[in-house]
Each structure stands twice: as structure tokens, then as C-alpha cells.
Image (cartoon, rainbow, N blue to C red):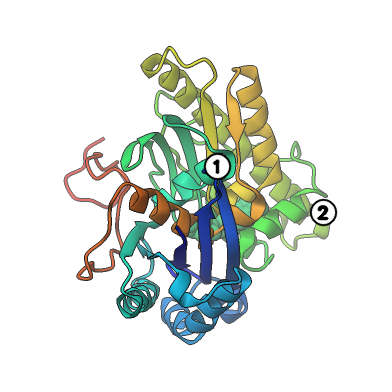
Amino acid sequence: MYVLGIETSCDETAAAIVTRDDNGAPQILSDIVLSQVDDHSAFGGVVPEIAARAHLSALDRVIEAAVNEAGMTRSDIDAVAATGGPGLIGGLIVGLMTAKGLAASLGKPFLAVNHLEAHALTARLTDRIEFPYLLLLVSGGHTQIVAVEGLGQYRRWATTIDDALGEAFDKTAKLLSLGFPGGPAVERTAMQGDPARFDFPRPLKGQNTLNFSFSGLKTAIRQEAERLAPLKEQDVADLCAAFQAAVRDVLVDRASRAMDRFEEIWPDMERPTLVVAGGVAANQVLRGSLAAACGNKNWRFVAPPLKLCGDNAVMVAWAGLERFERGEVSPMSFAPRSRWPLDEDVAAVIGSGKRGVKA
Ligand code: KG4
Ligand code: ZN
């Protein structure tokens, strides 16, 4: 069974084909990602209207490239999966309409995939891990701790009460004129810096919550940068290193607490797994510290290869394949969802902007 995946929820136009080999092992037959970063960099962030137009002009060619790279023709495809949300609505419309049109013309099923589920299931493709596992999802739009109990069974244990972690990296980079996207630039610059020069806050660390908060950290960096202005190269490197160290401490603290909670709920698992996913999971310092925390607790640590951390269509195709194998398809009437929580039942947190939410 060959599943074509399409991803257009943010600023990557991507298409990929996945399948299983004769032994059931997942196989990536093609993986095409066209980044729009040059279209957006002048604006210091993703401009939704530009993103939608860029997806529209590129998607057909990207799909063609994915089919060619797999050595197939379109008629070999058994199902077409596309990100149905959450994300920027213009891009989602482009991806969904294309997927539906292609599925209809081939007479094959269409599946709308939740982008967060796609990130969450990537580790099952790369490392064949079984349910349940603990997921730390850190991307440009989301920062969540999720208990992944089964396909479609997700319990969100924590989220951010303000900025997402990738957003915090991007804003820090912007403040320090390091360009966009900020994560890789901050990581690179931090390598030359001294993390001990500044003692930035570790928001919510040690508190009895699994939630995240990054806006206080962002303010602390801005104030320090203003105090030091004009910034020398070494100042910028030290600020990046200290920011990353604060983030690392917070992630390790929260992940460790979540691991304790996981062990209480699933006490009989010999060696549970922590999976880190999303664009920020590409960060080597954070990966290293989370791996060490897992080692201390006799947990298995799984982080997808760098190329599958950021947005890609392999993960969309894979989530589609898992759903399709279970006999699911989506109706052609499926409408794009700019908001599509993994855990529909979870209570909103204070700071989420939802009315009536109390501390
Ligand atoms: O998952 P992703 O590609 O898109 C979303 O679904 O949001 O994540 C993008 C985010 C951006 O904020 C980017 O700055 C961040 O991931 N990122 C990183 C690194 N590479 C990408 N953050 C920290 N360190 C990195 N090496
Ligand atoms: Zn993503």
C-alpha cells in the first residue's frame, strides 16, 4: 500500500510517499520539502497570504517530484493524505483541495491528517515504538506534553500558557538580529557563547505544574540586550547560550515530572519511551539533555532524524497510512481546521485567551 502525503499547513510545501516492506517495516520512498523561507525572511516571520500563494504555485511540482523520486506513477498511489489542520487556513485549503482532486481523479481514498498527530506518530515510523509513550512536542506553534495511548488516543498533560518554544527561539533571534527562522541561528550562535554569563529565569521550574511559559524569559533577554546595547558579537553569543540553557533546564524539569507521572499510570512498563518531536527537536543541546535525563531514569529516548523533526510530508503520509490501515478514510466534505487540538476534551489553560478559564 502506497500513501502519498501532502503538507501545506505553514511555510513548507511538502509531498512524500511511504509504504511498508514485506516484513511490515515502514519505508520512505520519497521525501520532498520545498521551504518558503526566502519568501518570508524579509518580513521576519511567516506571512499567511504569501504562504498560501507559494503553496499554490509549487504544490503540483512538489507532488510530481515525490512521485518521480519514488519511481512510481500517480496511478500506483493507494491513498492520498493531506494535513487538514491545525495551521494557516490558506495553505490548508491549497493542500486539501489538491489532495481531494487527486484522490477523486484516481478513484482512491482521501484522508485528512492532524498535523500534531503526524508529528506525534513519526517515532513509530522511524523507531517502530509501541503505544503508550510520552511525547514532548516542541514546534513553532505548539509546546505540549502528551500521553500517546494509542492511535487517536491522546491526553494532553501540558501546554504553554503564552509563547510556543519555537516562537521563543524565533523572537530571541529577531531581537538579536539573527534572522529567520530563529531556532537554528540561535543554536549556532550559542555554540560560541558562555551560558553562565547571564542567569535568566527558568519560568515555572520546580512548580507543581507541567505547563510551560516562555514570555518572562523573552522579556529578561530583551532587558539584558537593551542594557548592553550596542551589542558586541560575544554579547549576542552569550545571550543565546544563556537562553538555550534556561530552555534546556525547563524542558528537562518538565519532562522529568511528566515521566514520573507516566510511571505512576503505567507502573508495569519495563522501559518507557520519551519521544521528542517538532521543529525545536532538531536542537542538539536540547536533545542531548533530554537523552541524559532519560538515561538517568532508565527510559528510552527517541528523537526523529533532523529532517523529520521540522515540517515534512513523510509524517503526514505515515499518519495517513496508520489511519488507513485501520480502515479509516475522510469524507470529501472535510473542511480545513485552523484549530484542531489533539485532545479535544482537555480543559483550556489560563492565558490561552479562552473566556471563562480560571487559574
Ligand atoms: O515543526 P516546525 O517545523 O513547524 C511548526 O509546526 O511550527 O517547527 C518550526 C520551529 C521554528 O520556530 C524554528 O525556529 C524551530 O522550530 N527550530 C529550532 C531549531 N530548528 C528549528 N529551534 C531550536 N533549535 C533548532 N535547531
Ligand atoms: Zn509542525
Judging by the rendered image, the residue that carries numbered circle 1 is: 23
Closer to the eye: label 2 or 1: 1
Give the image quadrant in which the ligand numbered 1 is located.
Answer: bottom right
Residue 163 seen in the current view: no
Nearer to us in this view, 43 or 343: 343
Residue 284 sits in which quadrant?
Answer: top right
At which x and y percent is residue 172? 60, 57
Quadrant location of residue 3? Answer: bottom left
Q: Is residue 172 above or below residue 151?
A: below
The numbered mark, 2 or 1, whose residue comes first in the sequence reads: 1
Q: What percent of the width, then of the height, locates residue 248?
A: 62, 37
Q: Label 2 sits on what residue type? A: Gln
The label on residue 68 is: none
Camera-side residue: 356 or 95? 95
Q: Residues within 10 Å of mark 2 (few under 14, many from 20)?
A: some
Mark 2 C-beta closer than 8 Å to ligand 1:
no
Name the residue tied to disc 2.
Answer: 234
Position of residue 178 in the picture relative to residue 119 (left or right) = right
